[in-house]
Amino acid sequence: MGFLTYLWRDVEQIVFPNRDPHAIPSMDGAFSPNDRLDRATPIGDPLPGADAVAEAPDGAICISAGNKVWRLSGAGYQNRAVFAEFDTDVGALSFHPDGRLLACTGRGLAALVSSGVASYLAEAEGEPLHCLTAVAVAPDGTIFVSDGSVRHPAGAWCFDLMERNSLGRIIACGPALQSAHVLLRGLAYPAGLAVAADGQLWFTESFAHRLSRAPVSGSALAAAPQMMIRNLPGYPSRLGRSADGGFWLSLFAVRTHLVEFVLREDDFREEMMRTIPPAYWVAPALASGADCLEPLQLGGLRALGIEKPWAPPRSYGLVARLNADGEVVESLHSRVGGRAHGITAVLETDQGVVIVSKGSGRVLLQQRDAST
Amino acid sequence: MNELSTIDRPSELGPARPSGEPVLSVSKGSKIYGGVHAIEGVDFDLYPGEVHALVGENGAGKSTLCKAIAGAIRLTSGTYCVDGRPVDFHSPRDALAAGICMVYQETSLVPTMTAAQNIELGNEKLLTRFRTLNIQAQQLLQSLNFQVDPALPVALLGTARRQMVEIARAIYNKARIIIFDEPTASLTPEEIVHFFNLVRELRARGVAVIYISHALEESLKISDRITVLRDGKVVVTAKTAEMTREKLVRAMVGRDITQTYYAKHRGSDGHRHAAKVLTVENVTMGAVVKNMSFSVYAGEVVGIAGLIGSGRTEIAKIIYGALKRNLINGGMIYLRGKPIRYRVPKQAINDGICYITEDRKLNGYFETMRIDDNIYVSKLATRVGWRFLIARAVRRKLANYWVERLKIAALQRKARIVELSGGNQQKVVIAKSLVQDPSIIIFDEPTRGVDVATIPEIHAQIRRLAEEGKAVVVISSYLPEILAVSDRILVARLGRIVAEFAAAGATEDKIMYAAIH
Amino acid sequence: MVATGTTTAPSKAAPRWRSLRFSQEQVVAAIVVLLLIVFSVGLPGFATTPNILSLIRSISILGILGLGMGLIVISRSIDLSEIAIMACPWAVALIANQHGLPAFWTAVLALALSLAFGGINGFIVAFVEAPALFVTLATTLVVFGAAYWVAPVYVVYAPQEAVALLFAGRGMLFGIPMPIIVFAAAALVMHGFLSRTSIGRFIYAQGDNPEAARLSGIALRPLTVLEHLLVAAFAWLAGLVWIGQTGSMQTNMVIIGTQIFDVILVVVLGGISLVGGRGGVFSVVVGCALIGTLLNAFTIMDVNTEVQNIIRGLVLLTAIVVDNWLHPRDEETARQGE
């Protein structure tokens, strides 16, 4: 069977020579590598499992890590306190204009009133919401939430990638978590949502490496989504608004030829998934280098004590800033050998840009002025 | 022969003229080609155990002199002594018999024969046992400290090893004078180090070495004495210890040259508003280009460094349509977002891409044509410039414009191109491409075989193109050139782009490291 | 010098002398003039108008064929099937004419067949990239075989009443035989084409350095096909004159004749180098003039054919030796350009 797949793939290239092969774009231009992420200031001690960030109405930030939500406040966000605790891991966070904290948990979308009592949106159109990846709120109070996959929970994103699923959904519901309905379905792991100044809903599809926007009116889709970036060099994750009307895009890992190859080789991949523990799969990772059993490409070895410039990364730190037209204008990197890998969330605040590196379990603060 | 004194010679302190009898001396040597002196009244002497570097621009007469010494050509006038006895060589064979051997740039080994057979080539006995041959060759190679398997066919050896075989052959033929013509041109830096050790080894054995090289730094490093030739005449012969690079250049050119380095403060912000013009994605061609990816932006110069065989030239030719990438899994090339796959260069030219060849004699210019025709034919070959009848006014205008703009020094616009110096020929080849009004210009080795004085001029032209908003790619093995002109430097290695540097952060060391490891 | 103070190093040993040397066609032209003077003085009956006209007339067919061959040799190619393309389509067309085809359509049919064969040559050379030498050698046999299959005779006679068809070969205009006028006109057109049109420049460029031409953006494949078509057209024109002169078309000359060698001799003698890119129409003219003068003088002197052949061969050898002496192929000079 595999043979026929290959044959078909080859024939396809000859018959449609100009079909976009969706190859990894080179990291140049605005994506030129640098080490700015490694030079950013860490905020306090590591927060293992730090995943997402949201800005509270009072200027403090909330970080989700594990099953806790931490509240960081003060100059340089040095004061730290537990804000809320859930019975499952917490993912994306957002504050509703009315002051409630919206948190994506394993049981669904939780709306937490200050008192500590939560109400849940647990299912949409008959399917449970157990892979919530991002949440965004429109100015009119409509809540948008993305469900990465209907098959796997959020922690098992790697399975979803390796199965090459497109089972993600974007769901809209009213301010009181009522009348939830699916806006878009069949997405390749939507992992980031943001509502732009003009009211359009921007979303990323991680495993399709693309960024799109969809015009919405109220809680309904006004028109078909429009692709803004068709091919990113990494796997895009959450989106954050920037002050100038653009966005901050976090990419939790970058694509490598080896992973792309494995994703093409169905038989190999199925056997790998059957026989090898997920931690050792040839797959992107949020962090690397801790375990000697990890898959390693030869180029990743140090020669003469120097990391090769072309070392293929298993994990990588990458944040891109987009303008209002969705063009990448600058990027921050943590390259092979750096530490701030696996960036899952970015938030621009008055104090700077807060970057959550899930790979290293650190929260970083990038001073805006110093960076440019 | 004072071999003992040459083995451990105090090179810095000795007299300008080494003691002893010269093993070779040429006095008042002249060679006339069709009424013009290729070399004129050259005095040259060579002592045993000395490395004597010959430097000079292209056409200064270095090769002519060495060919005369090696017996490939005969001097028109002048005397020529080996060991103090006047000689007259009629063929290289005579010179070889006198112990003079020239190691050419393109090695003259028979690729299908083994190293041992090549060493014995020309001296075969009627019956030779392979085993004996191999053992003899092995002994010879080991005595020279060469790590070469004598039983391997030469085709399987790398350039450096081939050179070793060639040198071993020279030693086997009892050569006392070895002439190297651009020996390091196709060696990697590591091989160059190896080669230098080898030259020192030869010197220690009392062999006299004549060393011709383009790279002044190498000549300064390896030689005991340096002779500078200009326009067929000896300008100076001096001890290397007394020479510097600046002095050499001044002697070669006849005046001071200031190499301009350009402002490099463009950084990543430079791309913020520049349009991505050309995107190369995973382009693959056979085993030469493998998964090469990069992009080029308007208004910047992208330098591509890398060793020979790293796929630099091939990727340029693939973009240009002169070579074809693999049909299956060959990757994509986008020109302003539109996929392109050219069958012939004509299509690329019509889309505003041009490629300026690395070997202008082989496929750059038309040698029978004049400067203006050379330029005009390129214009006629474009869609815009095509017309059935030749317009002489247009031809004159184009020729005048480009001769002025590129400062082509020709006595007349109608001079034939072969009558120009290397630098001016290169400028004509550049004009031939620029006349096609391209928006993407790929320079392949833009200053190879160009006189030292012209190099900064060509660099300035390259910068000017980028400032005009064109996307420029410069492929070069000469790192100072890459550093001088590029905004961004890509390093190719084994068919891949392995590193990218902003011009500000790049050094020769970093680039070399990326190119090799 | 050009308006710049910072001129680069002066043009090296640069072979300025090359332009001072005589080109091969000038040398040949000088020899022709010399021979004309010698023969005029030494040979009674040589320097008369009728003899000179017959001299030129005798070489006009060779000249027309030489123009076509010259074109293709300039482009660094060769067409050995030129004689076959001259003879065979005309033989077939004349057969059709005998069966009642009007004279005009006879000529059109011959032209169409010639161009078809030229096109096949060009297509194979350009697109299959087979060496022209072998391709045209093979098509010679194919063309001859095909013609003989259609018209199984070696000599096809032209109808004597078709004046229009024979005019180009035996007519007179202002007292000048038509073949001379046709040759002169063809040479003029060819000269204009080669030196004044862009396609002419492309042909020189291709012959000079095909790879450089390709990299300059010249479409070599269509150009190659065009060159072979033009050769076929010249062959057709030569055939037209031939029919007028002899009143028939002999297909067997394709395989037994040495005419193709004469054509190549004329072309190479005049300085159109087989290396390509060199020479021009004038080369063909002086080459023809030399051969024509010699043949004419030999005829007057009543020299037999064997001796004529020997002398023709010697002339070619001399030309080659003189060329070598004038343009030494020394490696050093060849590299001087670098």
Image (tube, rainbow, N blue to C red):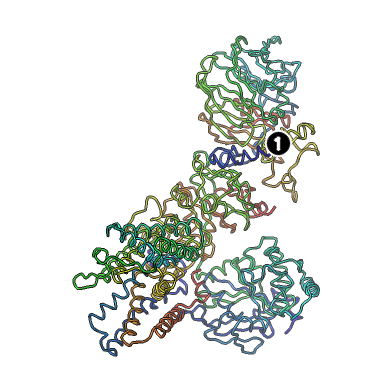
Q: Position of residue C234 (x, y in %)?
A: 35, 64
Q: Which image quarter holds the N terminus of chain B?
A: bottom right
Q: Residue at x 42, y 53 (%)?
A: B436
- Residue A79 visible, this angle: no
Is C129 on the left-hand or right-hand side of B386? right
Would you call the spot at circle 1 few (<14 residues within 10 Å), some (14-19), or many (20 or more)? Answer: many
> Residue C202 sits in which quadrant?
bottom left
Q: Nearer the viewer, residue A131 or B124?
A: B124
Chain of the residue that carries numbered disc 1 in the rendered image: A
Q: Which residue position is annotated with label 1?
A: A315
Q: In the rendered view, would you say C114 is above or below C312?
A: above
Judging depth in this view, the residue of C285 and C203 nearest the camera is: C285
B343 or C243: nearer the eye?
Answer: C243
Task: Give the answer, above or below, for where B461 lies relative to A264.
Answer: below
- Picture quadrant of residue C305: bottom left
Q: Estimate the x, y position of residue B329 in percent, counting from the top left.
A: 61, 44
Horizontal relation, residue A17 to residue C91: left or right? right
Q: Secondary structure at mark 1?
A: loop
Q: Residue furthest left?
A: C174
Give the percent coordinates (x, y) of residue B296. Answer: 53, 45
* x and y percentages locating residue C75 in the rendered image: 43, 64
Count of numbered circles in the view:
1
Report if residue A35 is visible in the image. yes
* Position above or below: B209 against B444: below
| Left or right: where C328 falls relative to A282 | left
Dividing the picture into quadrants, the one containing residue B164 is bottom right
- Amino acid type, residue under disc 1 in the picture: Ser
